[in-house]
Amino acid sequence: MRLAALTGVELRKLALRPRTWVSVGLLCALPVVVAAFLGTSELAPRPGQGPAFLSAVLGNGQLYPAAALGIVVPIFLPVAVCVVAGDAIAGEAQAGTLRYLLVRPVGRTRLLVAKLFAVLAFTLGAVVAVALVSFVAGTQLLGTRPDALGTTTASLSGTSLSPQELLVRTLLVMAYVSVSMLGVAALALLLSTLVDSPLVAALGGLALLVASTVLVGLDAASAIHDLLPTRYWLAWVDLFRDPILWTDVRRGVLMQLGWAGVLLAAAWASFTTRDITS
Amino acid sequence: MPAAPHRRAAGLRWVVVVLGTVLLVTAALVGRPAWSAGGGDGPEGGDAGGDGVTRVLARAAASASVPFTGTATSSGALGLPDLPRLGDVAALVGESTRTRTWWAGEGTWRTDVLTATGERGQYASGGQLTGWDYERDAITVDAPLSGARLPRASDLLPPTLARSLLAGATPEQLVEQGATDIGERVVAGRLADGVRLRTTPTAEQPDASRLSTLDHADVWVDRATGLPLAVDVVDIVGGPVVSAAFDDVALGAPNPAALVVPDPPGASVRTAEVDVAAGAATAAPWALPDQLAGLPALQDPLSTGAVAYGTGLLRLAVVSLPAEQGRQALFAAEAAGADPLDPADDASTPAARTALVRAGALSAAIVVVPDGEGRRERRAYLVSGAVQPELLTRAAAQLVTEPPERRP
């Protein structure tokens, strides 16, 4: 079967699974709940506290998509990505369908790549869904009057951002956040080729996330900070500075590509080598 | 597939993966200086390879006119309490601070403190400083650029920190005080010459090394332009006191658009508060001496009530406080458990009430002198520095015993 067709099959399977929509729904629900509380209480976090932009979104819901992505990036989005990536191969093995899947004229490499595309599609789709839902929630719940839509917004540096500039920067944030998930997704996919339990694979990806987060906060581990996958996750904030500070964004992208390259290569070596018994 | 070729193919795949990983990690670690250089210029072969220490120091001291754009990280190990009217000082000297700077010259620059959730910018132009705080959505105006004041983020940029260490002494004097060549190193992708400043005994201060809590300061100076790129100040037990280094830097005139003060929609505009040091320096009733504890003044004592004394790493900062403010500070320090300066060091200090506060390498003493002419005539001083209490006691003794002039 050709890669495009195989990818289409995997995407269709992903779209037809209820748990896909449950996880996307939960991801979108959190920013809506936060916006509802902020909108009704009008109590934003004090300056310097809470997720980025949350102190600035009251009265300006156009910024809320970025704030919402900031809320889901540290834990909720990587958890969802790990669950989907961990299920990719191990889920088939646990259900006993992997052996039968490979009986068809499907190369293991092609199957792995198709599974990878499905995971990437889920990540991108989840990010887009969170951004769209939070834009609606932000503009409806956070006090942005309809006539205020289209007005300028202050960047972190105090300069004015036109609605077009704000849109471009929000799209850049969405792209960066999606790329930032590559490392944990690749590890969960690698583990998914090594074990027959999707839960173990997902937990392995989360273990990397937790370990990296702990080490990033530890000054004693500064020698390896530049190698940790979560080191530059919050660099998306730099996309709202003026001029944009690209340094950490560039490092973050390179870091994720490096982790993804190594882990996906290992996943390929593992999956094309192992004996499929289930 | 037969078993043996299958195993060989499998082994080969893993060998490829492991080799690729090793190459990638090696490239990341070895290439880190270049990675850190970001958009900056690459390493340059300089014309100062054979520079003596004197010339490197002279170029660093004269580097205020070198324009640049860059990001830097500074960190301090002075655990100061977070007190009111001290602004961001406790965070600046006790934590890690990341900044982005556009420097056109000494009076025209912008420094942003970058935080995970916002930005605090300072714009210097026309002798004034304008501040922008994203999270408070506020612009502050009319802060004076020069004069006595508390430290701010721009003071901890590698070039300004280095120049303040070099101030008050000629390069030749610093060499006499023990400045030595420590080789070269790449900082933010640029080749830098290193000089180590030390506190060594001189004719004026024969016990200088014993009186300082600092062991040395390493200053790394860009070979091509003389711009200091990194500074590390180390105390006598080998611990870091203050460090600052560029993460990436580009030499050349900054983008003029980046130096324009923003006019954010809806932001509040406030007049800058006078910080505690600037206020005390302005209100100070008594003139400070030209020389204190054998250290020369770095500013005209008649023009300000806050004066720095000393050269190299042996420095004292003295503020002549209004009496009531001094008394309040003394009571607050005593209530917090501060001990008096050791009167055994000098017979004169018992005439005054003193309180000694220490935070890491930093020592500070509050000295209140009841001079018998009524409460308003009492004198009070704040004496501080990265020095041993013995030097504070000497300074306090001189301030107590030498009757000062009233400031004009």
Image (spheres, coloured by chain):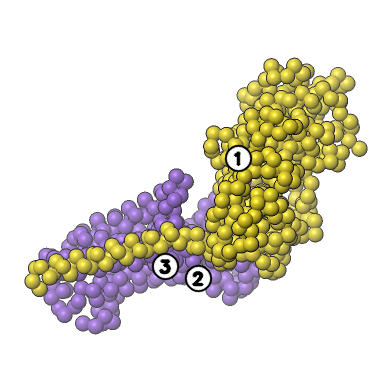
Q: Are marks 1 and 2 in contact (CB under 8 Å)?
A: no
Chain coloured purple in the rendered structure? A
Q: Which chain is yellow?
A: B
Q: Is residue A77 visible?
A: no
Q: Residue at x 61, y 64 (%)?
A: B250
- The amino acid beneath tag 3 is Ser
What residue sits right under mark 1 in the picture? B216
Q: Quadrant of the C terminus of chain B?
A: top right
Residue B49 image offset from top left, x and y in percent: 61, 58
What is the secondary structure assignment of the residue under circle 3?
Answer: helix
> What is the chain letter for disc 1?
B
Query: Do marks 3 and 2 share a chain?
Result: yes
Front in this rendered view, residue B313 or B196 = B196
Labelled pair 3, 1 in contact (Cβ < 8 Å): no
**Dot 2 amino acid type:** Leu
- Mark 3 to mark 1 CA distance (whole Å): 46 Å
What type is the residue that disc 1 sits on?
Answer: His
Residue designated by label 2: A172
Q: Position of residue B354 (x, y in %)?
A: 72, 23
Q: Label 2 crowding class (10 Å Cα cut-off): few <14, some 14-19, many 20+?
A: some
Report the front residue among A131 and A277. Answer: A277
Q: Secondary structure at mark 2?
A: helix
CA distance separating discs 3 and 2? 10 Å
At which x and y percent is residue A135?
Answer: 50, 68
> Which is more N-terminal, label 2 or label 3?
2
Badge 1 marks a residue whose secondary structure is: strand
Pick the residue in front: A270 or A176: A270
